[in-house]
Image: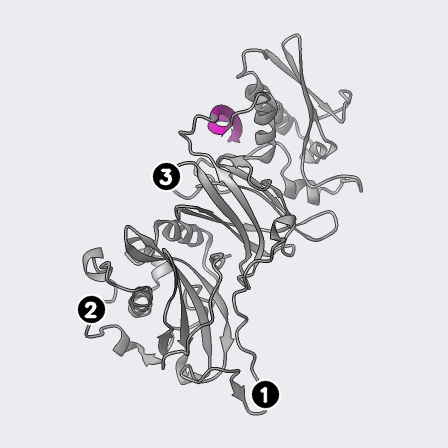
Amino acid sequence: MVCWLFLALILSACSRPTPAVPLPEQTTPAESASVVPGNPVSDATVLPISLSPREVTERFYAWYTTYPGNVLLSGVYQTSEYLTVDLINTLAVFQREGLPVGLDPILCGPNVPEALAADEAVVDGVFATVLMHVLSAGGSRQDDVAVYLRQVDGIWKISYITCLGQVVGDAGMPPGPPTTGDQTIPEPTPFQPFAPDLGSTIELPAPNVQTTLPMPVLAHVGQPGEQIVLVLRWEDGTELVQLTTALADEQGAGLVITSLDWSTTEERPQPPSQPATLDLLSQQSGEILAQQPVMVLSPFDPQVEEITLYWVQGETVQAEKRLIPHTSLIGTAAISALLWGPVPGNLNGWTTALPTPAEVLSYPGRQEDWGHRVQLLGLTIQDRVAVVDLSKEVQAYGGGSARVQQLSEQMRQTLTQFPSVDDVRILVEGESEHVLQP
């Protein structure tokens, strides 16, 4: 399922919409480079530094709506100079997973529009927001689309898009709730600034903690089955966007539990160590559900160290090198990272034999006192044997000799990388008898 993309910007009040203009007149304005359908123009002609955020938005939508084919399904968006690399990478995931039937996530509607109208941009430093009004054929329907941009090397590019709502009536109407007969149609819900206590719903990462990527995320937000957008924005403007689906926790409320990383690109951006902000947003409404400040360490930071984790690939386990914040409890940190599992959608296709949160929460044999994930209760080393005590939720592995063997091998190889460990023994809630049976 394709999800909308969101940015945690606070939107100022929008100016009066400009009158809707038929598309043929918008595609080749006198002061703009012409847009040839199907042929994205070079960066030098389409995106000079002098183009404003509004002009970039208008040109992108003019190109998008006049292209002779489906821009998303064809993958031609990957050559567009209007989009940031992060947005292109995210759209590539959507392209692989399939687009929604009868609905275009860029236009927020099912059909090619009759006209487009863009408000003046709201600019905040290197970030900007443009409200685009998309008018359907016959003028019977208007969708309001918030287009978010940021500067890349001095050039405005679109970083993501969200649908704000629908208005019935004339796109050139004056401000105020439009009407149809005796019925008043509410204005689209504005994008709301975050509340001061938004971090209270995030368990991990902790506020201002030093972290690396992949970054574990655990938050009690949204509704079960709801698509949640995770946006990590570094202080220098670097952005990482990832989509996930909220699970149902023990009480039936929404639960986001995942690992956040650059899983959709071969070349990983490597910004220097600096503060960043993690936002969790509803893909449907654009509402910021939770927010947390963190300190993301660069791979070259002297405060990080390397560990090796082992994931399932086919019938064997394969090694992954990871960087984590320096700790004296390196074995505990390694097993804790292993229990989180590989990054969803990782390019190597790694999985894990350890029960995932989705498996733990849906396991038919789960008990009332079970939590939502497998946790490490203790790790000791005795006579070069690492004794790993896991929580009861590990029983959600469901049996099977092959899975037990892979689970044990993941644990063994992860811990025997350390010189003090030759072998591994696994306990469940302190018990060693009749645990992890095939």
Q: Which residue is mark 1?
A: 183
- Asked if residue 307 is among those painted magenta in the image, a careful observer would answer yes
Residue at 25%, 67% in the rendered image: 37
Which x, y percent locates residue 404?
64, 26
Label 2 environment density (alpha carbons within 10 Å; few <14, some 14–19, many ≥20):
some
**Viewer-proximal residue among 234 and 366:** 234
Taking the view exactly as shown, the residue that stands out farthest to the top is: 383
Residue at 61%, 32% in the rendered image: 339
Question: Which quarter of the rendering shows the C terminus?
Answer: top right
Q: Which residue is mark 3?
A: 266
Label 1 environment density (alpha carbons within 10 Å; few <14, some 14–19, many ≥20):
few
**Residues rendered magenta in the picture:** 305-324
Amino acid type, mark 1? Gln
Q: Nearer the viewer, mark 3 or mark 1?
A: 1
Mark 2 and mark 3: Cα distance apart in space: 33 Å
Residue at 47%, 29% in the rendered image: 323
Quick check: 248 left or right of 352? right
Q: Which residue is mark 2?
A: 34
Taking the view exactly as shown, the residue that stands out farthest to the right is: 368
Which x, y percent locates residue 120?
36, 71
> Main SS of the magenta segment?
strand
Amino acid type, mark 2? Ser
Helix, strand or loop at label 2? It is loop
